[in-house]
Amino acid sequence: MPERLMDIDPAVQNALRELMQEDYPLLLETFSKDAVARLGRLRSSLDTHDWDDFRQTAHSFKGSCGNMGALALHQACEEAECAALVKDVQAAHRSFDKIRQGFQRLAPQLVI
Amino acid sequence: MAVHRPQGLVSDQQSSPLKVLIADDNPTDRMILGRLVARLGHQVFSAENGLEALVQFSAHQPDLVLLDALMPVMDGFEAARRMKLQSGENLIPIIFLTSLTETGALVKCLEAGGDDFLTKPYNPVILQAKIQAFNRMQDMHQTLQDQRDLLSQQHERLLREQELAKIIYDRVAHAGSLDADNVRYVQTAFAMFNGDILLAAYKPSGGMHILLGDFTGHGLSAAIGAMPLAEVFYSMTARGFNLRDILLEANNKLSRILPVGIFCCAVLIEVNPDKGLIEVWNGGLPEVLLLDRHGELLHRVPSTHLPLAVASAERFDPIPVVLPMAPGERLLCWTDGVIESRNQAGEEFGEERLAEFISRYEKHPQAIFDGLLEALEAFHGSPEDDISLLEVVMQPCKAPPATLLHEDVRHLDAQDWQLAYTFRAASIREHNPLPFLIKVLMEVPGLRSHAGRLFTILSELYSNALEHGLLQLDSSLKLDSRGFTRYYLERNRRLAALQDGWVRVVLDHRPDVAGGALTIEMEDSGEGFVEHNATKVHEGYAGRGLALVRALSEDLRFNVKGNKVTVVFVWQLGHTASS
């Protein structure tokens, strides 16, 4: 079984805390809101088999996860992208679940 | 989003803040990147898709653009393409934000006009390095543009200055002021300034001086030597000096002021329709040709003198060749630009081709000038050397033109006087007394409009006194053209050897009610000249002079011995010279 990636990299979060200063809570809020929106979008494009939209949404989400240090989520989004590229329905569903669960785990860890 | 200028966490900051446009569809990424850029001290503008990015680009004119590749509405590629178009000449760097690692995608970024990439997650150190590098590049680009614009401006200014200089130069150095129908000329110039100079001016006696010159080099430095030369030429011709005096002065002046290695090849011509002769001095130009009415070659005058500004005053020889020239005969003269002009194959036009060309025009020599121009044009498309071409046709004797010296407003005085002047051998050898005498006469305002006639009279009388009285030349020698040349050679030889003798001139002016009367006495120390030749009309050139003087004056008489002549010239107020 592959080594499980961190949900959140504390080093990245520390750097962000220092970067954003008093806007750090705003950053967390922005990320959370965007994550929720992404999940919704992923769900609907999966249902309609709109692979382009699924891929682009996963791609964008992947980017912000990387910047936030959310490594496990980053990995899951990458898998979603690949699945959409080859139009693999099964893989797409699996990766979507991973993203959803990953975020559920992550959300409480995003503390100030 | 708030714009921060916080205390620097990074060691070296930019010296001047930039305007940075960030376009990314992800709000989290926008926030983080924006803050990173602001922390470096720059001003941030944000957009969430390509279209909004374009709007911001136009509105704020950023110095640098950070552009996400995949965006909705309009993607980064299209936005980049349009931004590059809009930038025009200016360099606005575009850095693509991407986690795309496939080469194909990266190539696409470059093709769209991207200058670099920045991968996610964002590394603040790399971001700063890239911004700095592009800032430096942009500064360089701007400097280049500014210098190019400066150079362009300076070039424009230089051209304008040259144009102005050319106007002044043309007024001094070119023959545009002479509107004589017996002179045709063409001057072409490769560059704005022409090393070739063509001057022409009437003498007070009605003849003409012409100078065709070719200064070494090209451009302004070659042409500028023409100004002092033109000054000498025009002022001395107007005052009645002959070629010899003008050449001496010109050579002296140019030797003094031109740097070593700069000189002027020249031909000087005096056309004397009264006497039916021309004088030609050739220092360094190709042969001057004299053709008769039917286009046959009568004489060549090759270059037998050093060009102007080469020889010192002692070595300089100002003596021209004197040739008879009848009406209808023509003189052709050119600078070596004609001979040396090259065609596409690199062949020279050459002297042979030129000689052959001219021989083709027997029977209709008046077409040579135009024909030669056409032939030169046909030979080569664009000449790289200056070409000057001159043709002088002898016309029948005309009355001298009226006013040639500049009028100035002077008080009417000094009208009643007498002046006696004796020129002895040494003076006679070296100097021409006529300009001085004319200058004296011009003190009388009423005589100014008669300068031409007076000059002709004085000139004839002096010639007689000198050549027949002192030098004892026989004018019957001048009946044919070979004798002509021998006569003038002998004249110069005897003049150079003159040790004794004198010429005395008395000018006596009395005013009367409506004008005045000038009495001119000219006496020489010779044996005397018996006037009977002057009353007959001769075929040749001898004797024509005194008849002319008689026609111009009120009275002419000789003393018994024949070595003193008295001429009375009357003028009246309110009459023009032509009446």
Image (cartoon, rainbow, N blue to C red):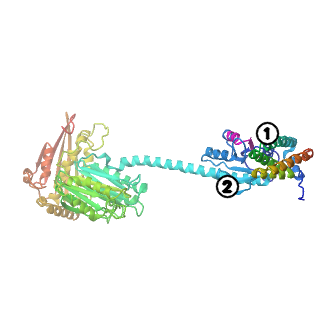
Q: Position of residue B329 (x, y in %)?
A: 18, 54
**Which residues, given as a range, are shown in magenta?**
B39-56
Cα distance in 3D space between marks 2 and 1: 33 Å
Residue type at numbered disc 1 = Met
Q: Nearer the viewer, residue B79 or A45?
A: A45
Report whether residue B243 is seen: no
Question: Dot 1 falls on which chain?
Answer: B
Asked if residue A46 lies in the magenta stretch, the reply is no
Question: Dot 2 falls on which chain?
Answer: B
Q: Position of residue B127 (x, y in %)?
A: 76, 52
Q: Secondary structure at mark 2?
A: helix
Q: Secondary structure at mark 1?
A: loop
Can you tell which mark lies on residue B46?
Answer: none
Disc 1 target residue: B1
Report whether residue B255 is seen: yes
Crowd class of label 1 (few under 14; some 14 to 19; many from 20; radius 10 Å): few
Q: Position of residue B100 (x, y in %)?
A: 74, 53
Of labels 2 and 1, earlier in sequence is 1
Q: Nearer the viewer, residue B44 or A109?
A: A109
Disc 2 target residue: B107
Left-right relation of A3 to B175: right
